[in-house]
Image (tube, rainbow, N blue to C red):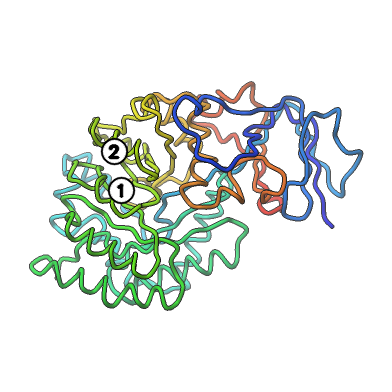
Amino acid sequence: MSSILIRNIKSLVQTCEGTQLVCGAAMKNLPIIDNAFLLIENDKIADFGSMENAPDRAEKEIDAIGKMVFPSFCDSHTHLVFAASREEEFVDRINGLSYEEMSAKGGGILNSARKLQQTSEEELYDQALERLEEAIHFGTGAIEIKSGYGLTLDSELKILRVIRKLKENTNAIIKATFLGAHSIPMEYRSNRSAYVDLVVNEMLPKVVAEGLADYIDVFCEKVAFSIAETERILEAGAKYGLPAKIHTNQFYSLGGIETAIKFGAKSVDHLEVLTDEEIDLLKNSKTIPTLLPTAPFFLNQDHTPPARKMIEKGLGVALATDFNPGTTPSVKMPFVLSLGCIKLRMLPEEAINAATINGAVAMDVESQVGSIAKGKIANVFITKKIPSINYLPYAFGSDLVEKAILKGEVH
């Protein structure tokens, strides 16, 4: 049996034995043990507590004096598999072009789809693996990866097969989401129903037959899919037993929240535009609001998710990167914490809860990861020497993760 003993931990953070979503006022509570130890045996957390109760020895020992240990971040919304960056659109936005204008002329998601369709599965895997390793370096240990940059049967399957290969060949906990309904390809814009037919009747059966997806997702927005189209796709997914996730309320409030709740969606993501009535609907549902503050930051939008109001009304929220080449080219979860605090007015404790245990719940992996608990998978990271947990979101430009441990292996 291999074992790692981390000694003299300044603060062992998120020592939460529970596996429930943390909601409302409870999000301010972050269990911490100061001057602590953490014992890892094989790929599991075996024990933890005050240093006075630490075991005498282990196969490998790490002295973490002055440093903190956190459970790895659970990034529950990414688009990690894509073929090329889109920095030219970054410049277009500086010159005044809006997201909707870019989409209307075949840019944005469609730009990524064209590039991906021309890229081999092997090349996509190599690129995605490099990005995943960067995410791990910044503290991520569980991640949801969506398709949606293929928009053809073959290319959507290609993305999902890459995700499966990442699952098989890395220590990260990975969930795959089928997002064939990410955008309407230009050739279908005069016959939208034909593309929905393709998603429902051709893509979805093949995805399910190969066991490639854990969830189904739809981008429900003016620039993407209507409520009726969203409902048709989610209904088809439900028949195959795929739980729903929905991108919605990024730019407009169109009824996506009601649709998410109607279909029992695991999460509803973005929510930059959200009414009080929609907050109340979410409060009375089991659908988890997942906030992606780096997207409005990068798009330089005035509206941001009303996290403060949501938490004060008793909701539990998750935070994720939305990593993608067009609107959020960053896998850095600590920066998401910073924006959660700076732009969404979340307290550091609330942001950490949102990025760990609540993110785990949004991916159905809360029994495995998301907190420091005996028997959970040993996905943790060790910081550099920092004075307090507040310093992690405060020092937004610094790389404060010194060492990542996934499934008991040091990375």
**Residue 296 location, x and y as percent?**
30, 37
For residue 249, side relative to residue 212 (left or right): left
Q: In this view, does 100 lie above or below 214?
A: above
Is residue 41 rendered to the left or right of residue 235? right
Q: Which residue lies under the disc numbered 1? A: 261
Residue 336 in view, yes or no: yes
- The quadrant in which residue 400 appears is top right
For the residue carrying disc 2, how many other residues have a C-alpha within 10 Å: few (<14), some (14-19), or many (20+)?
Answer: some
Q: Name the residue under label 2.
A: 281
Which mark, residue 41? none
Location of residue 145 in the rendering, given as x and y in whole percent from the top left corner: 44, 57
In front: 283, or 351?
283
Instruction: Identify the residue at image location x=61%, y=38%.
Output: 401
The quadrant of the image that shows the N terminus is bottom right
Q: How far apart are marks 1 and 2 (CA)?
A: 8 Å
* Callout 2 amino acid: Leu
Residue found farthest to the left: 190
Q: Is residue 211 left or right of residue 115?
A: right
Measuring 31% from the left and 52% from the top, which residue is drawn there? 246
